[in-house]
Amino acid sequence: MSQRSKLPGITLSDRVLFRRRLLRWYDRHKRDLPWRGSRDPYHIWLSEIMLQQTRVAAVVEYYQRFLRRFPTIHALAAARASSVLAAWSGLGYYRRARMLHATAREIVCENAAEFPRTSRDLRALPGIGRYTAAAVASIAFGEVTAVVDGNVERVLQRVQGRKIATRELWETASTLVSPGRSGDFNQALMELGATVCLPRQPQCAKCPVSTMCASRGELPTTKQPRRKKRDIYYGLSCQNDSVFLQQRPRDVSLMPGMWELPEAAPGNGNGSCLTLRHSITVTDYTVRVSRQPPPLHGPGRWVPRAQITRLPLTGLARKILRATKVVCKQFSQSNL
Ligand code: SF4
């Protein structure tokens, strides 16, 4: 899984091979969807907006019905908002329908029904982001521009065998996109993610680019270690403006030689005078502090309050002494 990408630096021959294999697979195996094959930017734009946050199977029927109701961008622009929302009813995320309608009106009124032909001009329209602009520009007008959606992201990360930040994903997709068939290439990469390189259990045996893929499977997830919970008890002993503190042994691995309050048995002392939370590495402690006399045995000494700031205290001891106002709030690590 941790092999290096088979597209190191993505050389020219790597790109050519990747495109050729992907497009050949797409030509043979693409799903028969009603917007496929259309070069009408209105159709492509409509399908892209409907496909946002909605499964392909749910979109097909709505897409066909919507186009029967509003076959052209003129028909959509001339419609009442209530009619558009009615045709959208059941697809959810109605803001998409309102934006679609508003944008159709803008294209018809401001642009004489001429669809912008570049991703840059498309992005200037309301409700059209980077992905939609690139999808429409590449599929309808053949602009050589890449798209990145969730499917593309998953495929490219697995092919490269590592997590990739958004900016690099767009750069990688732009490097790979086919100059001659950009629209098909973009749809092919998304189709691969949607039907073969599935989020769980990718079908690598059916994958046209498996020999170029560094993962050939899911990327290993970096699991967060399970956090543990523990209760811990400390005794706070004060007398004559001094506090009883103990020094940790110098041969322990955790905070050797630092000073802290003595640990106490649960239920000892005059009730809990303070409860606080404290986390160290993977353990979340509930810390209960009670006022009680110093332990009869073991190390430790009375430390005058004025000298406490000169001792190397543990973070937790500092927190407790601040919370109980034994030392003042401004007392920080820099005082040590
Ligand atoms: S080989 Fe497997 S993991 Fe790699 S791109 Fe193909 S389906 Fe995805």
Image (cartoon, rainbow, N blue to C red):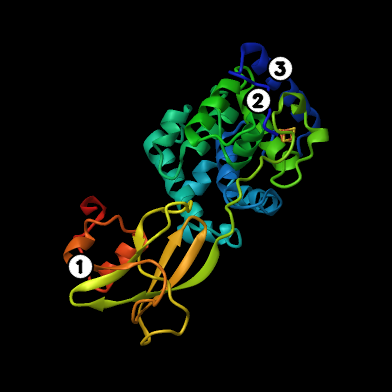
Residue 139 in the image: x percent, y percent?
Answer: 60, 30
Q: Is residue 236 above or below residue 267?
A: above
Residue in view at x 41 percent, y 69 percent: 298
User: What's the amino acid at mark 2?
Assistant: Arg
Viewer-proximal residue among 163 and 131: 163
User: What's the amino acid at mark 3?
Assistant: Leu
**Left or right, 244 with reference to 24:** left
Residue 38 showing in the rendered view? no
User: What's the amino acid at mark 1?
Assistant: Pro
CA neighbours of label 2 inside 10 A, class few (<14), some (14 to 19), many (20+): some
The image quadrant that residue 159 belongs to is: top right
Residue in view at x 37 percent, y 37 percent: 110
Task: Tell me, for residue 4, which label it has, or none.
Answer: 2
Residue in view at x 63 percent, y 29 percent: 160
Give the Cα separation between the discs numbered 2 and 3.
Answer: 18 Å
Quadrant of ligand 1 in image: top right
Task: Residue at the far top: name it.
Answer: 13
Of callouts 2 and 1, which one flags the residue occurring earlier in the amino acid sequence? Answer: 2
The number of numbered badges drawn on the structure is 3
Viewer-proximal residue among 311 and 123: 311
Task: Tell me, for residue 304, which label it has, or none.
Answer: 1
Of callouts 3 and 1, which one flags the residue occurring earlier in the amino acid sequence? Answer: 3
Label pair 3/1, CB-CB below 8 angstroms: no
Residue 13 in the image: x percent, y percent?
Answer: 67, 12
Any atom of ligand 1 within 8 Å of the CB at mark 2? no
SS at badge 1: strand
Q: Which residue is mark 3?
A: 17
Of callouts 2 and 3, which one flags the residue occurring earlier in the amino acid sequence? Answer: 2
